[in-house]
Amino acid sequence: MQHEFLLEIGTEEIPAGYIQPALESIKEIMGLKLAELSLAFTDIKTAATPRRLSVCVTGLAERQADRQEKILGPPRKAAFDKDNKPTKAALGFAGSRGATIDDIEITTTAKGEYLLLRLEKKGQETALLLGEFIPELIKSIPFPKSMHWGIHHTAFARPIQWLLAIFAGKVVECSLDDIKSSNQSRGHRFLAPEPFVVTDFADYLIGLKRADVIVDLDERRKQVVEEINRAAADVGGRIIPDDELLDTVTNLVELPVGVCGGFAKKFLQLPGEVLITSMRVHQKYFPVADNNGDLTANFVAVNNTRVKSPDLTRQGHERVLRARLEDALFFFEKDCRKPLKQRLEKLNGVVFQAGLGTMLEKTKRLVGLAAFLAEHTAPEASNVAQRTARLAKADLVTDMVNEFPSLQGIMGMHYAIKDGEEEAVALGIMEHYLPVRAGAPLPTEMAGALVSLADRLDTIVGCFGIDRIPSGTADPFGLRRLALGLLHIIIDKNSTLSLQDCLQKAIELYGDRLTSESTLENSREFIKNRFINDQTAHGVPLGAVEAVVSVDFDDVVDCRKRIKALVAISEQSAFPLLAGSFKRVNNIIKDHSRTTVVPELLAEPGEKNLFAALEEVKKEVGPLVAEKEYEQALHAILRMKEPVDTFFDDVMVMVEDEKIRENRLSLLARIAKLFLSVGDFSKMN
């Protein structure tokens, strides 16, 4: 029979950011364990609030199926002597499994004959297995930080207060430290704290709702949305969309109740980003906008309980936010008294990275690198890019960024505007931090893009130059993200740049600070691997990517054009055969690099025809490759299929005559060079 299993881990309030990852881990661990125990089930569902993590397994088998276990023993020749009597090895093998010699079979394997025991294993009751597994499950849930409490040995995100564990409507007996499992859950801490009995998951959901707890995450999120929209509508406004904040608030409350508050209009003179950050980061409040999308002097807070006096609650929220905004306004007005350009020297007291100097030194490198990049891709943007690079990091020493680090770049933009800087410079200061993550917006203007490229190149070569290299999943300096952003900007701006030259320039600007001799090659290889991963993640065939980057990885935009051409030509029916022939060519020539062919030594019709076809195709392919018309070039190369096939059918390459053999190898090397003018498409076969 199939039944339902429900586990609830009741706790003190768990941090909002811990909840979703914990539920995902619980579901994964539960699924793996049930499979390991050979317990069939239909589905695994999860639910949670700040005070509980819950998992429900439906369609779970009542017990394990009886099964036969096969155990392989020692080789037959070691198990029986010359008189075919069992040795100590055979007797020990049987005895260790509670069997006798009569139970042993002989089985033939790839390594010879071995002893075999077939043991009947009776399936255990699911309830017993769950009782043993529940403590193991709880202890294996990972958290960013765990804690011990009292005299208990268990570590968890927050102290565990109760355990609800029922299978088929009955309590699963288990314990964790001094907490014993039961069939009771608990409601809202303030509104319905009394325990209540649960029989199954449906009863659990209903019982908690009666006890003022919405445990279903989707339902609670929907109610948060309804509450904040209702509260904003009370003042004629609307909530500014913020899914991240919505997820956080959903996991901060068990019973969402929205309340709208206000603040003095004088604070609206602050940049909108400051107001929003003050509300969402510190207080988890939702900003309110009018119908034009402009911020109003209102916010919406979400309480975790119904209150008797909404006005009193509103005043409490307003008082807390007012203090934050007063500080922000003070910092903003103070910062505005001093132009960004006068703050540059103060960057000398800010360390960029240990071993890589100060932010002032980095600023000087960024100016030089931005000028270099502009010269090679957008000369018209050079002056703006250099000015942007000079001021890009100046806001790091402002009071506002010191208070709200997430506003770096954004505050620099606002201060630059107040300083009278060009609009392109101000925007570039903000945009040089873009993209902040994969899939996030990229710089819109060239100045910001150039400084962003310079910043990323400088950090990557700097870290590789002092051996601060990512390993496995550890990437403390975020170099993978920086490299990915670097690639996306280059592609988005269609910038024709030599990655080798850019990295070399970035290294030169460090002077003698970098100690690793392999900085250039390691940095280039690192970026290449990010390029491969990014392309394949977006559905580009790995073979096409490797076919190009294995030949050359320097101009990212050019690499993409070659890959696109290879993907398109690979759909031609003749292409896989030509790729196979190319692989054969490579295998034959091996280290033969000479490509000079002596026509007088071409004796066989097959090699004469191949040489003639090669020379004709080369004349066509050369200009096409020079113009980066790679797909057309590949269509021309595709005509080489038949002459190459005929050559391999009719001509022996490795003949005894050394001159003829070397000439034929040179002919094949010449063909390989032609093929490689676009990519090593033998890797696509």
Image: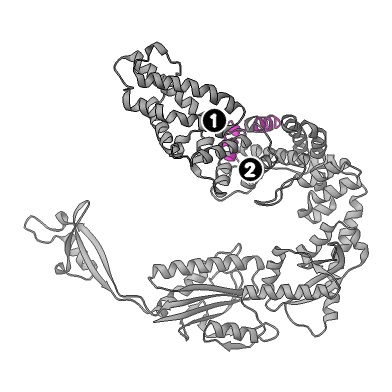
The answer to whether residue 530 is above or below residue 402 is: above
Q: Quadrant of the N terminus?
A: bottom left
Q: Is residue 510 magenta?
A: yes
Front one among 434 and 79: 434
- Residue stretch in magenta: 501-527
Q: Quadrant of residue 21?
A: bottom right
Q: Residue at x 47, y 86 (%)?
A: 169
Q: Which mark is residue 483?
A: 2
The answer to whether residue 511 is above or below residue 98 is: above
Q: Quadrant of residue 162?
A: bottom right
Front one among 133 and 671: 671
Q: What residue is disc 1 on?
A: 633
Q: Residue at x 81, y 52 (%)?
A: 401
| Spatial separation of the CA atoms under disc 2 and disc 1 | 31 Å
Q: Residue at x 40, y 21 (%)?
A: 609
User: Which secondary structure dominates the residues rendered in magenta?
Assistant: helix
Badge 2 or badge 1: first in the primary sequence: 2
The answer to whether residue 608 is above or below residue 493 is: above
Q: In the visual, does 321 lie left or right of 265?
A: left
Q: Quadrant of residue 383?
A: top right
Residue 637 percent coordinates (x, y): 49, 29
Residue 534 percent coordinates (x, y): 58, 46
Q: Amino acid at mark 2?
A: Ala
- Tell me if residue 49 can be seen: no
Front one among 463 and 596: 596
Q: Which mark is residue 602?
A: none
